[in-house]
Amino acid sequence: MIQLTDTHCHIHEASELLQLQTETKKRFLKAGSPRPEELLKNAQKEGVTRLLCVGTTVEDSEVAVTFAGQHDGVWASIGIHPHEAKVYRNNAEMLVRFAMLAKNSKVVAVGECGLDYYYEHSPKEDQIAMLRFQIELAQQHDLAMVFHVRDAFDDFWPIFDEYHKHKPIRGIIHSFSSHEKDLKNILNRGLYVGLNGIMTFTKDMRQLEAAKAVPIEKLVLETDAPFLTPKPFRGNMCEPKHVRVTTEFLAHLRGEDLETLAARTTENAEHVLGMR
Ligand SMILES: [Zn+2]
């Protein structure tokens, strides 16, 4: 039986622990409010035995941590998404609450954090301030990082490098769907590349070329569940179990066998995130 790892999902938001009506929560409600335990079971059946629940706000990160604490094979990443940066930038009390989570034994990473200039739901300077805050927190606690960067690599790299040259940052560029130049910049810094269902339905050949070019020792797999459902399940809610079809697609695209790709990407996830 192959063993796969979903290095990026949000299924903790399906639990009743989260009271807030987030976009993610709404997606779960629309899909008939599956219990997260059911999603874990579905994942296991497809060989997806380990997963990382990724937080996007302070409250959501708290839920991810609690959920991870209740389940074997589940770890948490605590993060303030760039969309949410303006909510927290000047809220010292919430940031203290957030930072406390870093000490929990099930927390292996900080993120998703980064810059999103495509939507720019928060002003750029707030996004940058929250990115800096989270890099500092990760370095202080020796945690990995999960980065979300969209249309913003030009601003991202100088900030990243400023910290990285003092103390190397280990982490993942999540939902990578860019081209060779960005891939080169990622690999030059020793970061890992997270690929998901986008690859199965993209029409952009350059994205696929870049996906092919990711060295197997730097590749990790993810879903971003409940979003980004891979083909042929478009229209359904995305679940961690869908790592399986994305892996099959990538194995075919890259000319690798499924067993090798599964084993290597799971090893990589262990290595970068310490999920073991
Ligand atoms: Zn995400």
Image (cartoon, helix red, strand yellow):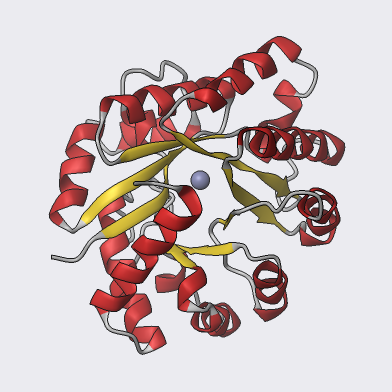
Q: Nearer the viewer, residue 207 or 262?
A: 262
Left-right relation of 139 to 192: right
Q: Nearer the viewer, residue 255 or 271?
A: 271
Q: Nearer the viewer, residue 133 or 23?
A: 133
Q: Residue drawn 31% across and 19% down?
A: 16
Q: Residue drawn 22% across and 41% down?
A: 40
Q: Is residue 109 visible?
A: yes
Residue 193 is situated, as x and y percent measured from the top left of the image, at 54, 65
Q: Above or below — where is 56 with respect to 184?
A: above
Residue 182 is situated, as x and y percent measured from the top left of the image, at 70, 71
Q: Residue drawn 57% across and 68% down?
A: 177
Q: Nearer the viewer, residue 170 or 19?
A: 170
Q: Residue drawn 51% across and 70% down?
A: 218
Q: Is residue 34 visible?
A: no
Left-right relation of 256 to 118: left
Number of dots carrying numbers: 0
Left-right relation of 42 to 15: left
Figure quadrant of residue 181: bottom right
Left-right relation of 53 to 87: left
Residue 174 is situated, as x and y percent measured from the top left of the image, at 55, 56
Q: Above or below — where is 253 with respect to 111?
A: below
Residue placed furthest toward the bottom:
255
**Which quarter of the rendered picture does the N terminus lie within?**
bottom left
Residue 231 is situated, as x and y percent measured from the top left of the image, at 33, 68
Q: Above or below — where is 132 with respect to 104?
A: below
